[in-house]
Image (cartoon, rainbow, N blue to C red):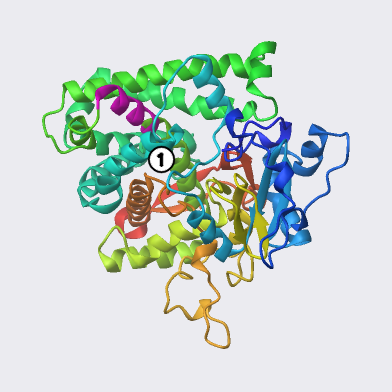
């Protein structure tokens, strides 16, 4: 979500790409101070050299895939608040948990976040209207308020369709797995699972009926394959402004411009098929038909389906990787799942929270500050972009005991391993905010949590998860390709647990 900033190395994080209309300078006001607050220019950060312009951004931000590491180094050098000028945009990276929470108090009634530049350019060029993620102002608020209740408050209705989809996925793993070789294409497999979860929530009981149709199954298969390519091509555009890529007719832009309309077409056909075959009236689509006009509803649900797979699927890949590399903890969590006789025991919830602490899907979450304000000991100008450094904060030993260790039990208040000698907890929950908080927090967080809890619980009760090669434990590292992904394919083996095998 970045602003439209003319910086090659910043484009990998859609968290920071900003639209042109938001490139308001406020540069003439960055010296102001209020009361005892220090002026904005006093916030420490790497120095910009005169006359270099965009080259400053390239030097400051480094390799796109390693931006999370570069910002972590800046925090070590300059502290919890680091100032960067990205193009003409004033930006501040924040690692302090209290200031991270305060950011959401300063976002105003219509929170604005940075947007992926490749998407905003495509939307403008083709005059395409998008869903909730791309909306702002009153239009966003009105639509968001409609979705808040069924998706974030009274969400128990989602449990049954998600459980059924996860159970079907376990059946597919049983059919495809092999005791001696790695499960092929785990990322794409989990991507399709995540798309199917969203469809089951949208269609309710009608999803099972739709799946009986070969036409519907083919649409979902095609969509899962095509939408997976969107993020691959988007990541290849991180180092070049899309307008320039379009003008030069570079291949990644050609591919992106072809695959986006195809993705939208397939998503629309899937939704239309679901509406035409809906008989249960228990899905989100049926509920929204009564509250939204059809064009807006189609835009929103199309975006839901597109966004669903990439984020949750890779978070689940990371969770399985962490369980595979920690077999003793894996067995402990498995025992907790069995003893609890539930798909959402405390240990599994801890696995998900630990995964998102160590490998946040979005390593930076951004908000534009609505008005001039005091931020810690500094004064921020209006429209400053504040970015939460989730990757850095989640691995800071001040906020988490042994921060580099995977410990799903650290989130339990009674866990002795999470307390210091003075009996004070050293785990700071607000240092890990993967879904953000406030009015513009992730609308799909309950779906994501439920589907990860359910699938991981079902996998643990059926399989032992292991890495296919021991060398992977040391070789796999997080890199940024729009979101946090492994630097190589994770090769996992699923072996039946002893009780099931017997």
> Residue 62's spot in the image, x, y percent?
76, 41
Q: Is residue 319 left or right of residue 64?
A: left
Residues rendered magenta in the picture:
293-304
Residue extending farthest right? 50
> Residue 465's spot in the image, x, y percent?
45, 52
Residue 3, picture quadrant: top right
> Residue 287's spot in the image, x, y percent?
19, 36
Residue extending farthest left? 279
Residue 176 in sight: no
Q: Is residue 219 above or below residue 161?
A: above
Residue extending farthest bottom? 422
Residue 159 in sight: yes
Q: Is residue 464 left or right of residue 63?
A: left
Q: Quadrant of the C terminus?
A: bottom left
Q: Residue sitting at 68 percent across and 59 percent down?
A: 81
Q: Residue sitting at 53 percent across and 71 percent down?
A: 427
* Residue 341 belongs to magenta span: no
Q: Nearer the viewer, residue 383 or 144?
A: 383
Q: Is residue 458 above or below residue 211?
A: below
> Residue 440's spot in the image, x, y percent?
42, 47
Element at label 1? loop
Q: Majority secondary structure of the magenta segment?
A: helix
Q: Is residue 230 above or below residue 468?
A: above
Determine which residue is flagged by label 1. 177
Q: Nearer the viewer, residue 143 or 63?
A: 143
Q: Residue sitting at 36 percent across and 40 percent down?
A: 141
Number of marks in the image? 1
Q: Nearer the viewer, residue 164 or 239?
A: 239
* Residue 300 belongs to magenta span: yes
How would you rate the neighbour count of disc 1 (Cα within 10 Å): few for under 14, some for 14-19, many for 20 or more?
some
Q: Is residue 66 left or right of residue 124?
A: right
């Amino acid at each position: 979500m970045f602003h439209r900033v003319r910086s090659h190395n910043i484009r990998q994080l859609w968290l920071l790409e900003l639209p042109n209309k938001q490139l308001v300078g406020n540069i003439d006001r960055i010296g102001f101070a209020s009361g005892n607050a220090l002026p904005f220019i006093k916030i420490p950060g790497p120095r910009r050299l005169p006359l270099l312009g965009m080259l400053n951004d390239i030097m400051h931000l480094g390799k796109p895939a390693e931006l999370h590491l570069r910002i972590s180094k800046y925090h070590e050098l300059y502290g919890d608040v680091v100032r960067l000028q990205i193009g003409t945009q004033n930006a501040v990276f924040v690692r302090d948990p209290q200031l991270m929470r305060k950011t959401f108090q300063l976002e105003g009634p219509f929170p604005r976040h940075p947007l992926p530049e490749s998407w905003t350019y495509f939307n403008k060029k083709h005059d395409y209207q998008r869903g909730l993620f791309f909306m702002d102002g009153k239009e966003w608020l009105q639509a968001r308020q409609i979705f808040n209740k069924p998706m974030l408050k009274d969400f128990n209705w989602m449990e049954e369709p998600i459980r059924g989809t996860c159970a079907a996925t376990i059946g597919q793993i049983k059919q495809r797995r092999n005791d001696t070789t790695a499960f092929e294409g785990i990322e794409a497999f989990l991507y399709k699972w995540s798309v199917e979860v969203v469809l089951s929530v949208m269609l309710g009981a009608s999803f099972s009926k739709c799946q009986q149709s070969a036409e519907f199954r083919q649409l979902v298969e095609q969509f899962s394959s095509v939408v997976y390519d969107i993020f691959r091509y988007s990541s290849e555009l991180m180092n070049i402004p899309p307008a320039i890529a379009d003008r030069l007719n570079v291949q990644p832009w050609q591919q992106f411009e072809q695959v986006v309309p195809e993705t939208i077409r397939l998503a629309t056909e899937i939704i239309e098929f679901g509406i035409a075959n809906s008989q249960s009236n228990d899905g989100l689509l049926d509920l929204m038909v009564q509250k939204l006009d059809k064009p807006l509803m189609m835009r929103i649900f199309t975006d839901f389906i597109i966004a669903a797979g990439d984020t949750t699927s890779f978070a689940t890949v990371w969770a399985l990787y962490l369980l595979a590399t920690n077999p003793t903890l894996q067995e402990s969590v498995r025992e907790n799942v069995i003893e609890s006789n539930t798909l959402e025991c405390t240990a599994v919830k801890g696995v998900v929270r630990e995964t998102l602490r160590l490998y946040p899907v979005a390593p930076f979450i951004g908000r534009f500050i609505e008005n001039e304000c005091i931020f810690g000991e500094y004064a921020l100008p209006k429209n400053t972009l504040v970015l939460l450094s989730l990757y850095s904060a989640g691995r800071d030993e001040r906020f988490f005991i042994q921060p580099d260790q995977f410990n799903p039990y650290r989130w339990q208040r009674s866990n002795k391993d999470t307390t210091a000698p003075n009996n004070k907890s050293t785990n700071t929950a607000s240092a890990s905010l993967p879904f953000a908080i406030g009015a513009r927090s992730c609308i799909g967080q309950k779906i994501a949590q439920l589907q990860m809890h359910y699938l991981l619980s079902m996998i643990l009760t059926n399989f032992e998860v292991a890495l296919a090669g021991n060398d992977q434990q040391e070789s796999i590292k997080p890199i940024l390709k729009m979101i946090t992904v492994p630097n190589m394919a994770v090769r996992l083996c699923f072996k039946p647990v002893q009780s099931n095998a017997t």
